[in-house]
Amino acid sequence: KTKVSLLLIVVSCTLMLSCQTSKLLHATFESDAVNGLPNKALPGDPAGDEITFDAVIEPQLKVQNSTISGSRSLYFTNVAIGNPPASQRFLRFKGASTDLSKTVWFTYAAQNVDPGMPVYVDVSDGYSAAIARLIIEANGAVSIVKGSDYTQYELLGNVGSQVHTVIFTTSLASKTFNVTIFKESGPAITVENKPFIQQDHTQFHNPARPTITFSHQGTTSSHTYALGFVSISKEKPKNMP
């Protein structure tokens, strides 16, 4: 098996076997109908986790057969949907309520299937306080946003069209996050101790609803970002050093 396949197995098994109090969200698409929308009400533990999206982006969402992780994935494609407000373009994976002062890990597996416009990956408290933004370009280049004005970027590496697993490690105590990206081949991409976008501690809700959000903001070309699974947990993935 490839290195990333083994990683996905370890991460998936670890998160599924974690105790209920540590798991905040676990989304796979194995029970969803092919060519249909994902089930917003996620089955199983934990209680309270959910997928949310506005009706306007439903044409962009389709469950498909895939081997990214398991047998099905959610294809998120930037097909034409008119020009709705940016706030209506988000695909959100919202975790159960938790104490955000504890370390939280956000993990997902994905692949650029039909590159076009960039996809934006945002981590937040589930309300209005931003933690981090990752940008996946059409060619697979990966950057993070630096600063609260969203105009400065730091290039981290490139995932191309490879299946990749992204792990955000977030600490409200230090207002910093780490990102680790495992690919099918080549070394992992790792950056540490990057500052939260929102640095004002009082702006974070606690208890929070830790949330990872995907969005296409451009409308000039298509881009499919296929998601194999999404998990949020208070337990460190055992594959991480």
Image: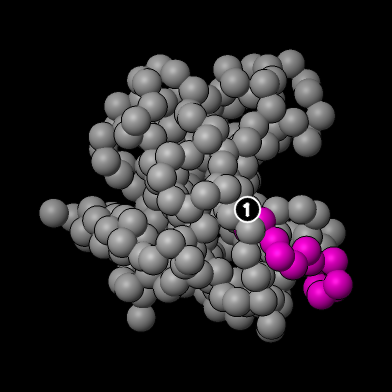
**Residue 112 in which image quadrant:** top left
At label 1, the amino acid type is Thr
* Residue 200 on the magenta segment: yes
Q: Residue at x 58, y 62 (%)?
A: 155
Q: Nearer the viewer, residue 182 or 44?
A: 44
SS label for mark 1 = strand
The image quarter containing residue 129 is: bottom right
Q: Inspect this view and state whether residue 157 appears.
A: no
Point out the image quarter for the C terminus: bottom left
Residue at x 43%, y 39% (from the top left corner): 43
The residue segment tinted magenta is: 197-210
Most foreground residue, 200 or 26: 26
Colour pattern = one colour
- Name which residue lies at 41% across and 45% down: 44
Q: Split into 4 quadrants, where in the image is the N terminus?
A: bottom left
165, 218: nearer the viewer: 165
Residue 102 appears left or right of 145: left
Q: Is residue 10 above or below residue 56?
A: below
Place of residue 22 in the rendered image (x, y in percent of width and height, measured from the top left):
47, 67
Residue at label 1?
211
